[in-house]
Every structure is written in C-alpha cells, then in structure tokens.
Amino acid sequence: MERVYNFAAGPSMLPLEVLEEAQRDLINYKGSGMSVMEMSHRSKQYQAIFDETEATLRRIMNISDDYAVMFLQGGASLQFSMVPMNLMPKGATANYCETGIFAKKSAAEAKKWGNVITITSGKENNYTNIPELTDDIVTDDASYVHITQNNTIFGTTYHKTPDIKKCPLVADMSSVILGEEFDVNKYGIIYAGAQKNMGPAGMTLVIAKKELLGKAPEDTPSMLNYSLMADNGSMYNTPPCWAIYMAGLVYKWVEKSGGVKALENRNKEKSALLYDAIDSSKLFTAPATENCRSYMNVTFTLPTDELTAEFLDFVKDRNMTNLKGHRAVGGMRASIYNAMPIEGVNELVKAIKEFEAEK
Ligand SMILES: *Cc1c(COP(=O)(O)O)cnc(C)c1O
C-alpha cells in the first residue's frame, strides 16, 4: 500500500526522510553491530546520539544555558502532575487558563497538589477562542501560570506568548513545538509529548529554567523530581533511548529544512489554504475564532452528522485518513504538523471543493 496523507492528531506523520534513515540504520547503527534499540544507554555510542540530539534541539529552538533540557517518559499527561509537584509548595496556589480539554486535565492534576485559580476560560464560547491573558489578571500568590499553547482538540492557539512578569509561565506545547517559533526565554517551563511534532510516542521533552529547579519537596518521588532528572542528564534510569534517537533525526530534519521559522512559514501557508477553502464554502464551517486559529490542528464542521460521515467516507478513497474530529467535539480535524506535505493539504482542499460541488 502507498503511504497515505495521515491527518492524525498524534501519533502523527513523520518525515519520510527520517523514517528512511532510521530504516537504514535499524539493524546495524553506523557499524556498531547493533541497533540503537539494543544499545546500553550508558555506552559512549548512545551518549553521543543523546548529546547530539540535545545540541541540535538547543540550536533549532535557541535554548540558552539558563535552561535544562530533559527527555523524560510519561507523556505530556505526567507533566500535568510534575509541574505542580516541582513548582509550587504543597498547598500553594497556581493559575490556570482553561482553553480546552487538555487544559482542564492539567488543572485537575494540579488541584490534587494545591490551589488552582482558573484565571481565563473559553468555556462560554465552547473553547472556540483564546481569552486574553495579561499580567494584571495573574494573582499575586501564583507560583506559576499554566497555558496550553495550542489546543489540539479545538484547534485554537496563542500565536503570541503572553507577557507574564509576576511569576513563571508554564506551557504545554505538545502540538505546536517546532511548528512555530517561540522565545524560550519568556517561559519558565515548556513541555511537550514527542508524538505530535517530534517523533514517535514514548518521550516527553521538558525545557526548564534552571533557577526554578531544586524546589520539589523531600518526599517527591525520584522519578518525578525535575532536578534529579536534570542533574543526571535524563539518565537517572533508562531513558526512552529509541524515541530520543528518532527525535534527534527529526531535529536534524528541522534544521535542514531551514529551521523552525521556515517551517512556521510553511505551516502558515498550509493552514491558510485550508481555512480559505472552508471560509469560502457555504457548506463547511471553521468554528475557531480567526485570530487564534491553529496552524497545526484545523477543526471544521458540516451541518449534520450524516454529511460528516459522508465526507469522512469521501476522503477515504482519496488516500487521506484520520480526519475525524476528537470524540469529545465531533466534526472534522486536519492535523497538519511539520511532516504533512503541502500536497496533502492540497488534496484535502480539493476534496472539500469537490464534495461541496456534489451537494
Ligand atoms: C496530546 C496532548 C496531550 C497528551 O499527551 P500524552 O503524551 O498522551 O500524555 C497533552 N496536551 C496536549 C496539548 C496534547 O496535544
């Protein structure tokens, strides 16, 4: 079977070049006589892969030495707990911005640890917009403010980093990391699961300002303690070796592709093609408010469930898959991360137009 245009939200498409390189080295990595999957994480050869992965990421995201980079496990969902456990004393307060389902989940975990004050909510508008976050609405007692930079399920995003001075800004960037350029210096913590825009599932990236580390209570489980993880170079125990290696290949691909800014421009172009097709249609609608529309996850709807089912069938015959919206919101969602070629987006635009013409 031919490779398909896979619009899945995650795990999602990887660059073909990356898959091919991994395939070439799968059984015998650069003459080592073994696969990366078989290597000791304490070996020189693996350490070199690890160091190069981190160095490449630091270059493409322009991460300074004031920040620690960690490659952990447990997914973005474990960060929902690790952030409060490491950044706020037990029972203290944190501010959360409720912009979607993952945002709510992150706040729910923080509530198990301390006080959560929801300072913005898009609930009234069914999460179709991103309420403005300014420093003056941050409470004085906040240990940090948490945002979901890109709301994977609703297709909304903060294109501009909120300017927060009162306390550190923490961002879940799972579905937008490397898809848009961010100034890391404006954040206290950035975290992201790898499986959307960085590689296969199994690795979670955490970029943490060093001055925030070392504040976890004594009884914090070792595996959940940022400073222990950072001090041990993410190798307190066996790291997700293969997923880190794959992310390293993706980082190099990003660099070769012109860097994050070049990819952001391509992503803008790709998403504009889709939003334009939807906005000029009388049948399809894009619910996300224009100024916060995601470049990564384009959500759109049809007037009835029947038409939605028909459209999803219609695209299947055209080498496109996983366009069904998240089970909680319905409709359609096209996740068009860095690895989705523009040809895939053009195919989808064509399908939208032809489907409408048939109606
Ligand atoms: C996918 C996603 C998550 C969940 O990630 P896991 O790695 O499955 O825990 C959390 N936040 C956002 C924004 C996501 O897109």
Image (cartoon, rainbow, N blue to C red):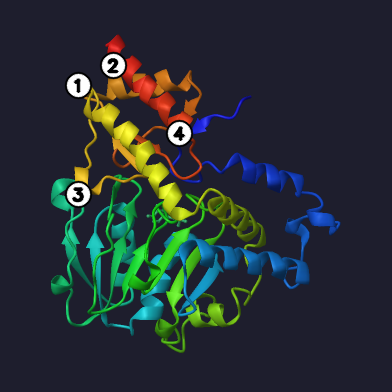
Spatial CA span between label 3 and label 1: 22 Å
Q: Which of labels 3 and 4 is toward the front?
A: 4
Q: Considering the image in quadrants, where does the C terminus appear?
A: top left
**Mark 4 or 1: the one toward you:** 4
The residue under label 3 is 129
Task: Pinpoint residue 294: horizontal percent, then vertical percent.
Answer: 31, 46
Would you say the residues marked 1 and 2 are in contact, meaning their CB atoms lie under 8 Å apart? yes
> Toward the viewer: 116 or 252?
252
Q: CA distance from mark 2 to mark 4?
A: 21 Å
- Identify which residue is drawn at 27% across, 59% down: 160
Within 10 Å of disc 4 (Cα), the crowding (few <14, some 14-19, many 20+) is some
Mark closest to the chain's N terminus, 2 or 3 = 3
> Mark 2 — residue?
356
Residue under numbered circle 4 = 342
Q: Residues within 10 Å of mark 1 (few under 14, many from 20)?
A: few
Q: CA distance from mark 2 to mark 3?
A: 27 Å
Instruction: Mark 2 or mark 4: name the one nearer the start of the chain.
Output: 4
Q: Earlier in the sequence, mark 1 or mark 2?
A: 1
Q: Which residue has dot 1 on it? A: 282
Q: Residue at x 28, y 16 (%)?
A: 356
236 in relation to 352, above or below: below
Give the Cα distance between marks 4 and 1: 24 Å
**Apparent side of residue 176 relative to residue 96 in the rendered image (left or right):** right
- Cα separation between marks 3 and 4: 26 Å
Chain-order first, disc 3 or disc 1: 3
**Local crowd at mark 3 within 10 Å, few (<14), some, or many (≥20)?**
many
Local secondary structure at mark 3:
loop
